[in-house]
Amino acid sequence: MKRLRACLGAATGVLLTAAGTTALVAGHASGATTALDNRWYAAAPYLMPLDNDPPDPAAIMDATGLKAFQLAFVLAPNGGGCSPTWGGTAPVSSDTAVQSVIDTVRAKGGDVSISVGGYGGTKLGQTCADAAATAAAYQQVITKYGLHAIDFDLEEPEYENTAAIRNEIGAAKILQQNNPGLYVSVTTAGTADGTGWFGKQMLLEAKSQGFTPNNFSIMPFDGGFNGAASQTSALTNFNAILQSTFGWDQATAYAHEGFSGMNGRSDSGEIFTQADFQTVLDYATAHNMDRFTFWSLNRDRQCSPVDNGGRTSGTCSSVAQNSWDFAKYSVRFAGTTPPSTTPTPPPPPTGCKTAWSSSAVYTAGDEVSYEQHNWKARWWTQNEVPTASDWGVWQDEGAC
């Protein structure tokens, strides 16, 4: 899905066996916090910490009660290679900017998961030699940031590459084995039928490798969707795919299923409002689904000026909302009630007075409008253009 976001050997600190299934892993980075309940990692919305006008996570936590964030995206270097970077440009090994964001979240009792992949860019599964090398690159990320959770976002063009998907799924299995308790989600494209051909091939690859993550999540947007009913229908269909692929019963399939939505206006012009999110949240909790998340917190604020759904932005939702409205649905999925807040209503619009005329005579107290502001005359005047001044004839009464 479009999200407006716009290896040759084992990595240092990881010694893989020939089978690629066991490892000696360096300890978690110093300062790592105790893991949150997995429900928080399952509820963590996506946040781009380096792009799309990143919001302050501490402010979001204070306003909503949110405790976990899904930081995006780790990719291969744009020039090639098998070392992890942020967005293809900023090496994880020398990062301090994202570490600062993580430190801020953890200082307030929260935590992060990190998402690898996403739409576009070059993925490590495409450039690393095999699953073991791919896992070694991702282990650097886990170790540096002391992670308790990781998300594999497998989309275009990577999930059309059989070898790349084999590497990614194999890496996810190795990381799951070598990091006991690590919460692992796998996110892929959604369609009206649940997921498309490439998504189904990815599930078959996981089955062939004997890999079961905490959940497989679909993104039911950018595919001709129209509100919550079409999304819950896709989730029902995806549940049937999970059952038939893995031999699970319905309840087991739901326990390994997740939803990853897009708040506001999607790339293809679909609109998903707060009411849509509530409907999908109700469906997810009623069916005991494992994950409920969305793209993205960078977009969880109203456009200024209000956009009314006319464009898709990476920094606002293009629907009417209060800041962090959509984050509160993630908080509810985690089992917590967001703080009660009463939004400050905007001041009522002031009507414009009769337009100023250069030929009219005005006396003290007369009111006019000029260039979308109202003005009041302090004394007699004629043919004096309304201009803001402490000593002029016109007193600015504000926009109208």
Image (cartoon, rainbow, N blue to C red):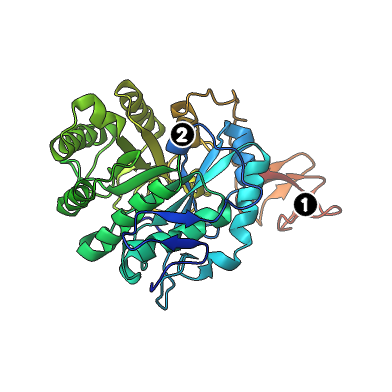
Picture coordinates of residue 335, whole percent (x, y): 48, 24
Write down the residue under mark 1: 381
Q: Is residue 32 visible?
A: yes
**Disc sitting over residue 358 in the figure:** none
The disc, 1 or 2, on the residue closer to the chain's N-terminal end is 2
Write down the residue under mark 2: 38
Picture coordinates of residue 181, whole percent (x, y): 45, 39
Front one among 242 and 393: 242
Q: Is residue 127 left or right of residue 300?
A: left
Front one among 28 and 277: 28
Residue placed furthest toward the bottom:
79
Picture coordinates of residue 78, whole percent (x, y): 42, 74
Front one among 133 and 103: 133
Label 2 packing within 10 angstroms: few (<14), some (14-19), many (20+): many
| Quarter assignment of residue 251 | top left
Quarter of the figure with the N terminus: bottom left
